[in-house]
Image (cartoon, rainbow, N blue to C red):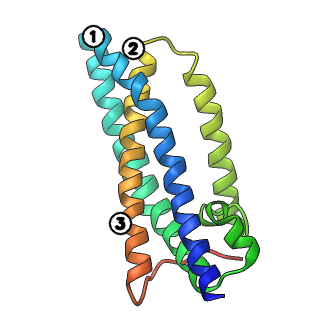
């Protein structure tokens, strides 16, 4: 069971990192295209304001304060209390889609629905506006990846990690 826990935790963490990294890799070229096109003064102001907003709201408040510590706690829980189902579906368990308290499941599913809807809507935008939005999202996701790495490292190396995994 100890080996299952370690494999499940590794799969859970790597799966979440891969999902976030894939999003950054997919969105970064659109963000870069906006800069290559050249931005007027209004577009620069909107881009800077939106980037700061996304860094704070998505990166700091969303990832660093909430998602990353909880996900890391769930990775640790998976390592310490493995089951076959949680290990096989490690990334989904780590993100709180199942075996989570009611609030965590509602947040995970609602946020996923919201993000998918936004992705569809943002694809409709023309450049440079799509690139401006994607710049902010890339910044927030990059902050999220870094905070998740720090949180997972802390959760798996410290004797005590005082964040609840919010399991049911």
Quadrant for the N terminus, please: bottom right
The answer to which of marks 3 and 2 sits earlier in the sequence is 2
**Could you say which disc has been placed on residue 150 in the image?**
3
Q: Secondary structure at mark 3?
A: helix
Residue at x-position 58% and y-position 30%? 119
Measure how far apart labels 1 and 2 are at the Cα level. Answer: 8 Å
Relative depth, front residue between 153 and 65: 153
Q: Is residue 61 visible?
A: yes
Callout 3 crowding tier (Cα within 10 Å): few <14, some 14–19, many ≥20: some
Quadrant for the C terminus, please: bottom right
Mark 2 = which residue? Answer: 128
Relative depth, front residue between 67 and 84: 84
Query: Residue 80: where, in percent of width, then height?
Result: 58, 86
**Could you say which disc has been placed on residue 38 in the image?**
1
Query: Residue 155: where, in percent of width, then height?
Result: 43, 77
Q: Secondary structure at mark 1?
A: loop
Q: Secondary structure at mark 2?
A: loop
Q: Which residue is situated farthest in the left direction here? A: 41
Relative depth, front residue between 32 and 42: 32
Left or right of 63? Residue 101 is right
Residue at x-position 62% and y-position 61%? 91
């Amino acid at each position: 069971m100890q080996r299952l826990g370690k494999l499940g935790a590794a799969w859970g963490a790597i799966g979440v990192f891969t999902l976030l990294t894939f999003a950054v890799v997919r969105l970064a070229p659109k963000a870069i295209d906006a800069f290559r096109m050249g931005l007027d003064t209004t577009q620069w102001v909107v881009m800077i304001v939106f980037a700061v907003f996304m860094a704070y709201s998505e990166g700091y408040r969303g990832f660093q304060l909430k998602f990353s510590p909880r996900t890391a706690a769930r990775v640790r829980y998976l390592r310490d209390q493995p089951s076959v189902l949680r290990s096989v579906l490690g990334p989904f368990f780590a993100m709180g889609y199942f075996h989570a308290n009611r609030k965590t499941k509602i947040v995970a599913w609602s946020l996923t629905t919201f993000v998918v809807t936004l992705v569809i809507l943002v694809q409709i935008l023309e450049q440079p506006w799509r690139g401006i939005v994607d710049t902010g999202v890339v910044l927030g996701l990059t902050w999220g990846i870094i905070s998740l790495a720090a949180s997972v490292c802390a959760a798996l190396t410290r004797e005590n990690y005082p964040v609840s995994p919010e399991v049911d």
